Image: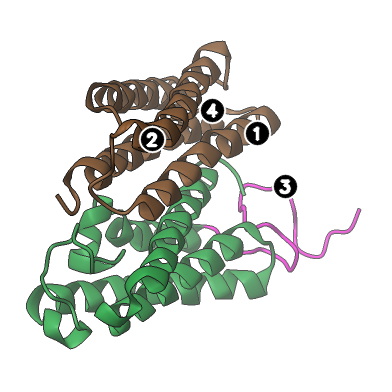
Chain colours: A brown, B green
Amino acid sequence: MIEWFTTVQVVVACAAGILCLVLGLAGRVPGDLSMGAVALVELLLLAQLVVAIVAPAVGNQPSGSLAEFYIYLISALILPLAGGFWALIERNRWSTVILGGVCLAIAVMVYRMGQIWFVQGA
Amino acid sequence: MSGVGRVLVFVYGVLALAATGRSVFQIIDRFHEAPVAFTLSALAAVVYIVATVALIAPGRVWYRVAWVTISFELVGVLVIGSLSLFAPAALGLHDIDPFGRDATVWSVYGMGYLFIPLALPILGLLWLRGHRPVDAGDDGNRDAPTTSGAAS
């Protein structure tokens, strides 16, 4: 894991989450903006997956449990897909709120992943 | 089910995922360290999954299942939360750190999960109280334009 990239990811996920919550509570159905924000969060997670695969090979070892790290990462990767499908099927404001919930949950999970990689066991 | 109920189901789903992932990992990786706590952790995960299903599934039986599971969660988070705080040894915990390696979804009233495990059963029970199933097969939404016994 790369520390600055992890920070960027948490900040983006929080921003996307708050954006979707606000849009949803304002009565907006899932649209390009909210779905785009979630897509960005998912894209960063995919980048994180690549980083996590490459990092140990170039000497960037996690201090904590790699298995626990991957449980979080894989769960996080699934969430935007589930939320996105839900938003495509259920076209109402609450789906936008749920997209916000997905992003905030991912922010917490990425933070936790950072703790496992950098803090746990160190 | 409509509106806010969907958000409730979603949050239950995420918590079920979180509790399941964590307890499975803890049981595989270090069950011997705190068997009582990790068993309770797994039990909590299963109850969250059943509660999520019960909130989605229609009908009186599932409504009752939802009541039982969500009440169980409230009791669980209060009892285990108190034990983890005041008598961690009873659960075989080594410390009261809600983010530590022995921590479970109910430790210190769900502090490691932003107290969502404490708030959620209360919100769930309030939601259930306002959404009794009108008829068998009804989805529990009292705003639905159904009258008892009406058949189309």
Residue A67 drawn at (x, y percent): 40, 54
- Taking the spot 21% from the left edge, 83% from the top edge, the residue there is B91
Identify the secondary structure beneath mark 4: helix
Disc number lying in front (1 or 2): 2
Q: Quadrant of residue B61?
A: bottom right
Q: Amino acid at mark 3?
A: Pro
Q: Are marks 3 and 1 on the same chain?
A: no
According to the picture, the residue beneath numbered tag 1 turns out to be A85
How crowded is the residue under tag 2: few (<14 C-alpha within 10 Å), some, or many (20+)? few
Residue A50 drawn at (x, y percent): 46, 29
Residue A59 drawn at (x, y percent): 29, 34
Q: CA distance from mark 1 to mark 4?
A: 14 Å
Q: Is residue A75 left or right of residue B75?
A: right
Disc number lying in front (1 or 4): 1
Q: Is residue B130 left or right of residue A19?
A: right
Residue B40 sits inside the magenta stretch:
no
Identify the secondary structure beneath mark 2: helix
According to the picture, the residue beneath numbered tag 4 turns out to be A93
Q: Are marks 3 and 2 on the same chain?
A: no
Q: Amino acid at mark 2?
A: Ala
Q: CA distance from mark 3 to mark 1?
A: 28 Å
User: What's the chain of the residue with tag 3?
Assistant: B
In the rendered image of this protein, does residue B51 appear above or below residue A16?
below
According to the picture, the residue beneath numbered tag 3 turns out to be B145
State the mark number for residue A57: 2
Instruction: Answer whether residue B71 is visible to the viewer in this image.
Output: no
